[in-house]
Structures are given as C-alpha cells and as structure tokens.
Image (tube, rainbow, N blue to C red):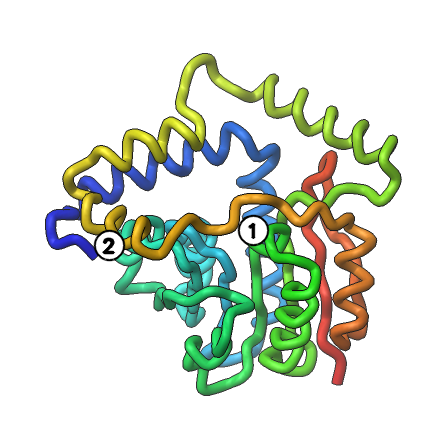
C-alpha cells in the first residue's frame, strides 16, 4: 500500500466507488442487507463465527457485515491491488484482507483459515470465473465450510431462457434508471481519474505490473450455477431473493 494514501483520501475514493457501483447495480444495498440476514441466521449460537468474502473489492460488503455483527471474523479476498489498498486503509483493523487469485494455484491455502467457515459470500466475482474454474472453486468452498454452512452468491445471474433473460434485464435497467440521479461517474471514469491520483500511484504501478484482471462475465445462467453447486456437493441450492436478473443464490453444505 502506498505510504502517501491517507485515510481521508482512501475514504474519498471508496465513497466514489460505492456511488458508481450503486448507480449501475439495481438493488445493491438491499442485496447486501439480505446477505446480512442470512449470515445472522447461520452464525446464531456459533462463537467466533467466520465468513469469507470473495472478490471483496474495497471491502464494501465485508465492512457492512462486520459492523452488523462485530464478533464476526471476516476474511476478504481480492487480487486487485488498488481496491485492496483502499480496503486495507479503511477497514484493515476490523477485516483481514488477503491478496490472492480465487481459483488460482494454492488460493485456498493463502486464506490461512485455521478452522471451518460458517459462510462464504460473493457479490461481484463468481460470475466472472470460467465455468471450469468456477466448478473447482465451488468444490473447494464446499470443503472449507462447516456442515450447515452457507455459500451465498449475490450477483447478476441471468435466466436460462433467452426471452425471459431479456425481459428480466430490462426490468433491472429501468429500475436503475428511475433511481439514478442526474450526472455522476461510472466505473470507467472512476478508474481513469484514480489512475491519475498521486496518492494511488504505487498501487496502480503494481496493478500494471500484474496485468489487467479478468473483465468479461462468464454468461452462465442461474440454472447452470445451481447445477454446478449440486455437482460440487451442496445438499440444498436455491434463490432467496431476486429482482430482474439480480439474485441472492444460497447453497447449504449438508452433514
């Protein structure tokens, strides 16, 4: 992390990150609330409950969960040095951040968990993993969770039927347009301006050294995610919240 990155500067960039994400993701805050509801349920009565946040970015979801459940041990994982740097500067005393490529060689060992997880959550990453890698990740998460533990995928999961997928996407787009305030920046402008900020120079230098992160979505449908989770060994799989093509999909480890 660049030593020139003050807490105030990190907060400013993180707030702008949150705003542009909220602009393009219908029901984002509601999805985060649903994830918190699920974690309160699965961790009730468990001392030192542990949760893994996959593709944590700046720690948006991880920090919300830890504030809501202060006794929760949260491990937040990402491979983007810029987003991780902001997250560590803001939330590093309450959330443990891990720099690793989910699905890469030895990624689960990098977590250094020491005990089974009560839950694993993701809001922005699993829909970007290639199908072969995703199946391996689902299988590894099944082994990392305790019996009764939850895997929660809260993201964009399109319908299998193309016509229905198009209609669901339109519902989401129109809802986002109705809620969107005039003006504001998008992801491209955020990244462009952040890349010119002196306080983020070292983090961007590291980002350039590593090369661009995966950017394309895998296009897998909700039904295909369910199929892969069942192949990975999860006993019960289904959606608990949905608006348009944004879903909260849960998988329960049996035993």
Q: Which residue is mark 1?
A: 123
Q: What SS does tag 2 mark?
A: helix
Q: Is residue 240 above or below residue 143?
A: above
Badge 2: how crowded within 10 Å, few (<14), some, or many (20+)?
A: some
On the image, the x and y values in percent for residue 45 come to: 57, 77
Is 150 or 107 nearer to us in this picture? 107
On the image, the x and y values in percent for residue 90 come to: 27, 52
Image mark for residue 89: 2
Badge 1: how crowded within 10 Å, few (<14), some, or many (20+)?
A: many
Is 184 or 39 nearer to us in this picture? 184
Callout count: 2
Q: Residue at x 42, y 71 (%)?
A: 73
Q: Residue furthest left?
A: 4
On the image, the x and y values in percent for residue 221 come to: 77, 48
Is 15 or 231 nearer to us in this picture? 231
Q: Quadrant of the C terminus?
A: bottom right
Residue 252 is drawn in which quadrant? bottom right
Image mark for residue 104: none
Residue 186 is drawn in which quadrant? top left
Q: Is residue 81 above or below residue 106?
A: above
Q: Residue at x 21, y 57 (%)?
A: 1
Q: Residue at x 65, y 72 (%)?
A: 136
Of mark 1 and mark 2, the one earlier in the sequence is 2
Q: What SS does tag 1 mark?
A: loop
């Amino acid at each position: 992390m660049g030593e020139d990155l003050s807490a105030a500067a990190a907060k400013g960039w993180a707030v702008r990150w949150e705003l542009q994400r909220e602009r393009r993701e219908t029901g984002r805050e509601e999805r985060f609330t649903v994830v918190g509801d699920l974690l309160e349920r699965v961790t009730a009565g468990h001392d030192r409950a542990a949760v893994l946040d996959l593709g944590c970015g700046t720690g948006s979801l991880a920090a919300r969960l830890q504030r809501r459940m202060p006794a929760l041990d949260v491990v937040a994982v990402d491979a983007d040095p810029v987003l991780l740097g902001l997250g560590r500067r803001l939330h590093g005393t309450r959330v443990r951040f891990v720099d690793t490529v989910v699905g890469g060689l030895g990624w689960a060992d990098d977590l250094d968990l020491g005990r089974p997880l009560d839950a694993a959550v993701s809001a922005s990453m699993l829909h970007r993993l290639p199908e072969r890698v995703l199946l391996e990740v689902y299988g590894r998460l099944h082994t990392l969770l305790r019996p009764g533990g939850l895997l929660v995928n809260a993201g964009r999961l399109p319908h299998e039927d193309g016509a229905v997928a198009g209609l669901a996407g339109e519902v989401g787009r129109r809802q986002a347009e109705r809620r969107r305030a005039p003006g504001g920046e998008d992801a491209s402008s955020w990244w462009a301006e952040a890349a010119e900020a002196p306080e983020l120079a070292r983090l961007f230098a590291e980002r350039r050294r590593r090369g661009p992160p995966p950017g394309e979505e895998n296009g897998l449908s909700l039904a295909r995610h369910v199929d892969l989770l069942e192949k990975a060994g999860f006993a019960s799989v289904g959606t608990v919240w949905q608006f348009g093509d944004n879903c909260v999909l849960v998988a329960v480890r049996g035993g």
